[in-house]
Image (spheres, rainbow, N blue to C red):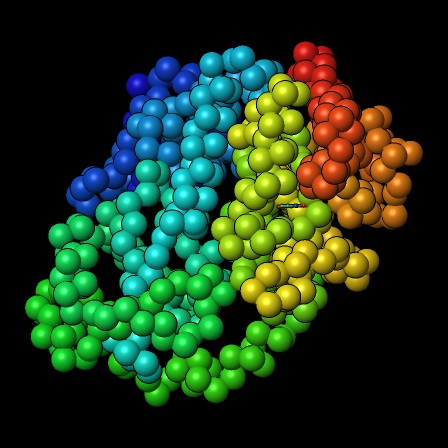
Amino acid sequence: MRIIVLDNDTDFEGWRKAARRLATHDVKPAEVTWTIRRDDKLSSAACANELPDAPQAQFNVSAKFLELAKAAVLHRDDQRFALLYRLLWRLRSHHDLLSATDDPDVAEVHAMARAVYRDIDRMHAQLRFREIGRERTAHYVAWFEPEHRIVELAAPFFAGRFADMPWSILTPDVSAHWDGHAISITPGVAKSEVPSEDRIEEAWRRHDNGFSNPARLKMMEMPQAYWRNLPEDSIIKPLIEDAMRMTSGPFIARKTAEPQQRQDQPMPRKQPQAHDTIAALRAEAVNCRACPLWKDATQIVFGEGPQSATLMLVGEQPGDKEDLAGHPFVGPAGQMLDRALEDAGIDRSKVYITNAVKHFKFAQRGKIRLHQKPGTTEIRACRQWYERELAAIKPELVVALGATAAQSVLGKITPINKNRGRLINHDTTKVLVTVHPSYLLRLPDEKAKALEYQRFVDDLKIAADQLRNSARAA
Ligand code: URA
């Protein structure tokens, strides 16, 4: 039996190196025990196997497997490293193993990755910062209990969204801190070390601090007289003191003097990469300034769904509800889409859903924000994100919902009625074009609505059949 001791719970590189070495030397999965170093005295060197390093070119695994493995190591299941090694071992002789969705190992690794991505989405959607200190000494703190070990992967999203405020995310596993320049990771803390809601509530008074936060968070203010009296061992006090130290530093200078210039700087355009993760793309996209739509939108609404999805749905742009919630297709069009997907036998939780344009375009009419159709300039400016999502997900089929989506996906204006309901080969992807669900909502006549709805479901069934056939053929 070989015991492999990894440096920490999320030591993907350690696992990868050891697994490559073990597999090259034909060590069977049943002969390996994977453990995590819990005690400094137990150095990984002492327990590491004595096998020589694997030659680099001995065997390769697909980018898809590496992507799955990177996500699965963040799962709390104790057996994750053993499962991944078993899969790696089997992939050597069964290259298409990952398409065998009824294989228990494959199903399990997909389920683990899905759970991790869901947890990252939950953290992005639910985490709320509270302000500690005031004005130039403010530090923002959030407590979060992730289901899996996702903090390091999820934190860059907050660095992008809240680039102008120093924050700390405290969790039982690790804590992440942003100082305006870089994220640092320190050990986790117990919940008892974080001031309780009651303690905070009693001393803080709610206010909108004028920080133009696109997510419209309600911040809280804590009088200095209060935080100065916090116990020395409070987790918060050192954070505030750090923030105080930064008052004359570059962080504050940037925060107070030039937020607009920083925000207006164009982003460098990056090439699509198969190894990008959606979480990382989403974090990057938070700063997107490729067109002016970000200025009025509440936030970017990036694509969502499992990275392993075989079906990708592309809509037009987020609507009012999506803009506020930060998630695609959660408003009325989303409900229509959910119903049609269900009627077509497609499980939405297995689909990656995104939009051609990722910021809400609208015209303000009194209190109402009227949806405006995005133009070619905005579709082109935003296409880089679709291209990068496509490269990261590598779906078997893309369904374009409506004319804007079709224009983005196929790279040219494409009439829907002439092209709907058939598979189109485009570059390396199959594309199906159909109507946008909001078109169904706008139809005034109930009979026409029912008919068009059925046509829409029939189009989606073509997608479902195609995926079933290719899964069977694999
Ligand atoms: N319409 C879209 O095209 N996308 C959404 O996310 C919501 C409505």
Which one is nearer the viewer's eye here, 364 or 297?
A: 364
Quarter placement of the C terminus: top right
Quarter placement of the N terminus: top left
Q: Let me know if residue 456 appears in the view.
A: no
Residue at 53% in and 30% down = 349
Residue at 24% in and 47% down = 172
Residue at 33% in and 82% down = 136
Question: Which quarter of the rendered image does ligand 1 occupy?
Answer: top right
Q: Is residue 417 left or right of residue 432?
A: right
Q: Is residue 334 left or right of residue 138?
A: right
- Spot occupied by residue 37 in the image (x, y as percentages of width and height): 25, 39
- Spot occupied by residue 401 in the image (x, y as percentages of width and height): 73, 38
Residue at 75% in and 57% down = 374
- Spot occupied by residue 143 in the image (x, y as percentages of width and height): 27, 54
Q: Let me know if residue 421 appears in the view.
A: yes
- Spot occupied by residue 433 in the image (x, y as percentages of width and height): 80, 34
